[in-house]
Amino acid sequence: MLDHKKLPGIEEMALSRKLKDPSAFSLQPKHQRSYTIKLSRLFVIGMLMILCSGLLPTFSVAQDLLEGTEFSKQYLVQLSGTVMNETFSGAQALLTLMPPAPGSNNPYQLIIQGFPKKNSRNSFFWNSENSEMTAIANEITCDIKRTFIKPVPMHFIFLSPELLRHSGALAAKAGDEGKKLAESVALPTLINARAGKLKLRIQSNSVSGTVWMKGYDPVEKAFVLYSARLYGQKSNHLQPRQDVKKSTGVGE
């Protein structure tokens, strides 16, 4: 005869199974937990894809701007702006867009220099290799690392008012005629940049943007801010020339 008191009951057997399987006490069914895990994995993968897309090199942007070629592009641009609270217009510069130099972290190289002379008054020189560059679609930003200790090899050309005051020409003739005479004998100063930013929007046949640079003028013994807007059209086979003098005459 079996002792029914010693046989485990149905409720006791069910409880024993639950104790051996902790998942049986979970508030979520197994299929619901599995669905939640899948959603979490998809979310993580999506975030990684977004982050990686921002870290990918921007060479594709450069190739689009160069239209899939390895040839450089040139744009002749007009400059207008202010320098030390003096407005100017009519200055020119030559913008050259080209593939990046070997070993460069930039998607391409960008050089802007005065035209028809490299050291023309109110022009500037910019080499993207000496700045931090970012590119989104057809918009390019180059930023000089701000430092007031060591200037970078980029500059703007500025005619210091102090040079005009010491030329003696203003004392000889008054008004605009005296100013023009003073400018004809004074030589502008090359101001090395210690900070600056260049923003461009480049199309296939045109370019527009803004630039500012700041540097120390040893003549004025003060920091000078140069800012300008630029716009221009695509050109071909242009080459700025360097004046034989260290500085160019102003009335040119």
Image: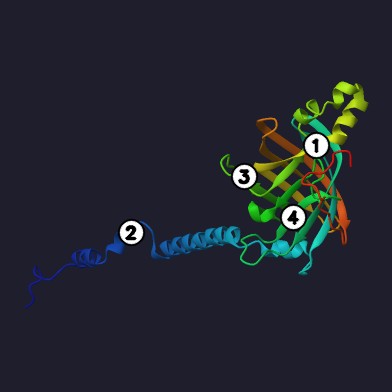
What residue type is disc 1 on?
Gly
Q: What secondary structure is marked by label 3?
A: loop
Foreground residue among 163 and 100: 163
User: Sequence order check: which comes first, mark 3 or mark 4?
Assistant: 4
Whether pointer 2 and pointer 1 mark residues with C-beta atoms closer than 8 Å, the reply is no
Q: CA distance from mark 2 to mark 3?
A: 66 Å
Q: Which mark is residue 151?
A: 3
Q: Find residue 186 and report its horizontal and vertical position in percent.
A: 82, 35
* Residue occupying the far bottom of the picture: 1
x 77%, y 29%: residue: 161
Badge 4 vs badge 1, beta-carbon distance below 8 Å: no
Q: Nearer the viewer, mark 1 or mark 3?
A: 3
Name the element at disc 4.
strand
- The residue under label 4 is 111
The mark that comes first in sequence, 1 or 3, is: 1
Q: Earlier in the sequence, mark 4 or mark 1?
A: 1
* Residue type, label 4: Ile
Mark 3: few/some/many CA within 10 Å (<14, 14-19, 20+): some
Residue 84 image position (x, y, % from top left): 74, 31
Q: Circle 2 sits on which residue?
A: 26
Q: Decide if residue 135 is in sight here.
A: no
Q: CA distance from mark 1 to mark 3?
A: 22 Å
Residue 199 image label: none
The secondary element bearing badge 1 is classed as strand
User: Residue 49: which quarter of the image?
Assistant: bottom right
